[in-house]
Image (cartoon, rainbow, N blue to C red):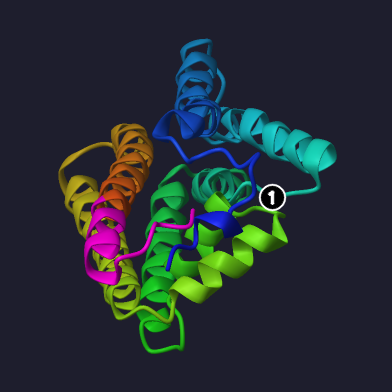
């Protein structure tokens, strides 16, 4: 039996390139603004806050246009914004490092704890990407959870996401012992954006491999 007929005809397959605007606007541009403002004499704390303006406006634009939140963009922006707010309030960029580690710990713990829940958090993140507001696609994705292969794959990937967040914390703390706060903030911002991109690419490649295995083992066409 095939599930092909259940997929909406207008559906567009997910591509990594679809995420590049988000990664550039929410990851690369804030770093460039931060370094540019600092170069012209703006204090590091306020320069960091200035870097948050673009991703904040981009996410606001996305919400106004589509009434949807961009989960990847919010993930990146949350890391930058929380540290910027702490830096401005305290007047010390060191707190950017502290809040960054705390936020990474929170995200890592969220992924880790979700492994003990009925469905891991990555199940919902991927559903948001492949289905969005399309109820029929969401229903198809939900039905895939009944497949042992999908459950096992999503749990394994969720565990890897959690591990990466905790590794980032260790790297940032190690850098804080030997580098200036300004250097750590710059490196950490690049590392966070790079790690997010690497995780997305890993997830995409894994799901493509899972799709092929699903079709071999289930003798059915991948429905999404």
Identified at 31% across, 42% down, the residue is 201
Identified at 34% across, 71% down, the residue is 150
Residue 214 on the magenta span: yes
Location of residue 169 by image quarter: bottom left
Location of residue 147 by image quarter: bottom left
Residue range in magenta is 209-224
151 relative to 54, above or below: below
Identified at 39% across, 83% down, the residue is 113
Residue 114, percent across and down? Answer: 42, 80
Which is nearer the eye, 101 or 3?
3
Identified at 29% across, 66% down, the residue is 219
Which is nearer the eye, 100 or 3?
3
Q: Is residue 80 rendered to the left or right of residue 134?
A: left
Q: Residues within 10 Å of mark 1 (few under 14, many from 20)?
A: some
Q: Is residue 194 rendered to the left or right of residue 21?
A: left
Residue 220, percent across and down? Answer: 36, 63
Q: Which residue is mark 1?
A: 69
The outermost residue toward the right is 64
Residue 142, percent across and down? Answer: 54, 73
152 relative to 80, above or below: below
The rendered magenta stretch, by its main secondary structure, is classed as helix
Residue 110 appears in view: yes
């Amino acid at each position: 039996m095939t599930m092909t007929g259940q997929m909406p005809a207008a559906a567009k397959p997910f591509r990594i390139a679809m995420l590049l605007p988000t990664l550039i606007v929410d990851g690369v541009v804030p770093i460039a603004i931060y370094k540019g403002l600092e170069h012209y004499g703006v204090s590091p704390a306020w320069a960091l806050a200035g870097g948050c303006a673009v991703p904040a406006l981009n996410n606001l634009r996305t919400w106004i246009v589509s009434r949807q939140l961009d989960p990847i963009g919010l993930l990146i922006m949350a890391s930058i914004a929380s540290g910027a707010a702490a830096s401005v309030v305290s007047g010390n960029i060191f707190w950017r490092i502290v809040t960054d580690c705390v936020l990474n710990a929170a995200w890592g713990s969220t992924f880790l704890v979700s492994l003990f829940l009925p469905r891991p958090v990555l199940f919902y993140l991927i559903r948001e990407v492949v289905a969005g507001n399309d109820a029929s696609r969401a229903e198809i994705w939900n039905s895939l959870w009944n497949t042992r292969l999908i459950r096992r794959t999503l749990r394994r990937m969720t565990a890897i996401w959690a591990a990466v967040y905790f590794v980032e914390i260790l790297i940032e703390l190690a850098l804080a012992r030997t580098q200036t706060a300004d250097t750590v903030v710059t490196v950490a911002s690049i590392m966070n954006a790079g790690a997010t991109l690497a995780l997305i690419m890993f997830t995409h490649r894994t799901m493509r491999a899972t799709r092929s295995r699903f079709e071999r083992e289930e003798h059915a066409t991948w429905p999404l």
